[in-house]
């Protein structure tokens, strides 16, 4: 994969932990230049930055500050020179009690939409504008979820809805901008062993997740990252608009 990723400039959101960190590591191991976006876990990136001082660049940004996304993207592009690939990985899943107060429910709904869908949409817009100004175009990889297709439990309806929005967004980009050299893909993981999934395990038990999958072991972030690398490499461009399930056979459609 190194041959295809070498010197590609790739922005990964939510790159300091979980799936994002694994994607960042895979890309760096394969000689890409990576803009690592993070929100609160900057300290956890120190080792990576030390190991790859010339090709790993950290950028702090809270994706709830949607209005300042243009300034954030400008900063990233200026530092990197240009962008070849945007990986929208950052996301939240917040449990929301359907029988609880309306105000709490709507607040969680709005926060989930802001981070998972609204910020992603705006980041895509800014990336597309940048790609349109480049002869080589660019690629967008959006990390959605199995929940977009299968649905989720009653307390994660907002999460499922936001992730389904990401799928339609990605497909629209693929259809609208293919002739301009822009391709877009959706990754749809099932349970992946990260802090996010831990919330579900705490609530429903790990056995519940294990019982749903066809494979023996739960998916790890390292099982997702190489696929993102493959999509970023340029070897899969004719699959633009496609969704790629990585869910250990728990939902095959
Ligand atoms: N873990 C799973 O089971 C699973 C399943 C399907 C899809 N996903 C998706 O994969 C992606 C990564 O999830 P993960 O499991 O690694 O979760 P995680 O909680 O370990 O990481 C989430 C990342 O998003 C970032 N983030 C959250 N809110 C942010 C904000 N306001 N501003 C900036 N960054 C913010 C965090 O800093 C973190 O880096 C998410 O989009 C998630 O929806 C995860």
Image (tube, rainbow, N blue to C red):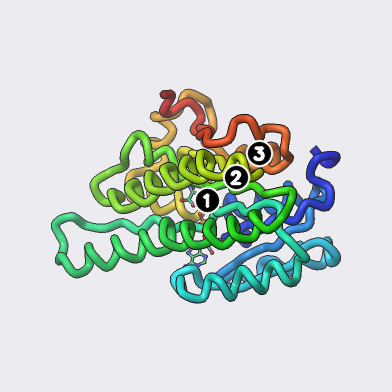
- Quadrant of the rendered structure where residue 145 is? top left
Residue, disc 2: 221
In the rendered image of this protein, does residue 86 appear above or below residue 243? below
Q: Residues within 10 Å of mark 1 (few under 14, many from 20)?
A: some
Name the mark nearer the viewer: 3 or 1. Answer: 3
Q: Residues within 10 Å of mark 2 (few under 14, many from 20)?
A: some
Where is residue 214? Give x, y as percent: 47, 23
Question: Any mark on residue 240, and which?
Answer: none
Residue, disc 1: 194
Q: Earlier in the sequence, mark 3 or mark 1?
A: 1
- Quadrant of the rendered structure where residue 211 is? top left
Q: Are marks 2 and 1 in contact (CB under 8 Å)?
A: yes
Q: Earlier in the sequence, mark 2 or mark 1?
A: 1
In the depicted view, which residue is nearer to us: 49 or 193? 49
Write the residue at 31% across / 64% down: 110
In the rendered image of this protein, does residue 39 appear above or below residue 230? below
In the depicted view, which residue is nearer to us: 95 or 26? 26
Left or right: residue 96 versus residue 192 is left
Where is residue 135? Give x, y as percent: 74, 51
Query: SS for tag 2?
Result: helix
Q: Is residue 19 visible?
A: yes
Query: SS for tag 3?
Result: helix
Where is residue 148? Give x, y as percent: 38, 41
Question: Any mark on residue 231, and which?
Answer: 3
Q: CA distance from mark 3 to mark 1?
A: 22 Å
Left or right: residue 237 versus residue 165 is right
């Amino acid at each position: 994969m190194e041959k295809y990723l070498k010197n590609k400039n790739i922005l990964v959101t939510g790159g300091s932990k979980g799936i994002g960190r694994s994607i960042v590591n895979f890309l760096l191991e394969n000689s890409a230049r990576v803009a690592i976006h993070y929100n609160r876990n900057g300290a956890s990136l120190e080792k990576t930055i030390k190991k790859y001082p010339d090709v790993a660049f950290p950028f702090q940004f809270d994706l709830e500050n949607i209005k300042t996304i243009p300034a954030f993207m400008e900063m990233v592009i200026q530092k990197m020179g240009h962008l070849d690939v945007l990986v929208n990985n950052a996301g939240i899943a917040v449990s929301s009690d359907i029988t609880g107060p309306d105000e709490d429910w709507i607040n969680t709904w709005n926060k989930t939409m802001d981070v998972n869908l609204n910020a992603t949409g705006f980041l895509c817009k800014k990336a597309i504008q940048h790609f349109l100004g480049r002869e080589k175009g660019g690629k967008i990889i959006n990390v959605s979820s199995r929940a977009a297709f299968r649905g989720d439990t009653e307390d994660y309806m907002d999460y499922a809805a936001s992730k389904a929005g990401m799928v339609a967004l990605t497909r629209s980009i693929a259809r609208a901008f293919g002739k301009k050299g822009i391709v877009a893909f959706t990754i749809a993981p099932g349970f992946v062993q990260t802090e996010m999934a831990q919330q579900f395990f705490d609530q429903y038990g790990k056995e519940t997740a294990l019982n749903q999958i066809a494979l023996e072991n739960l998916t790890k972030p390292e099982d997702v990252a190489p696929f993102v690398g493959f999509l970023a490499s340029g070897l899969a461009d004719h699959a633009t608009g496609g969704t790629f399930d990585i869910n250990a056979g728990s939902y095959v459609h």
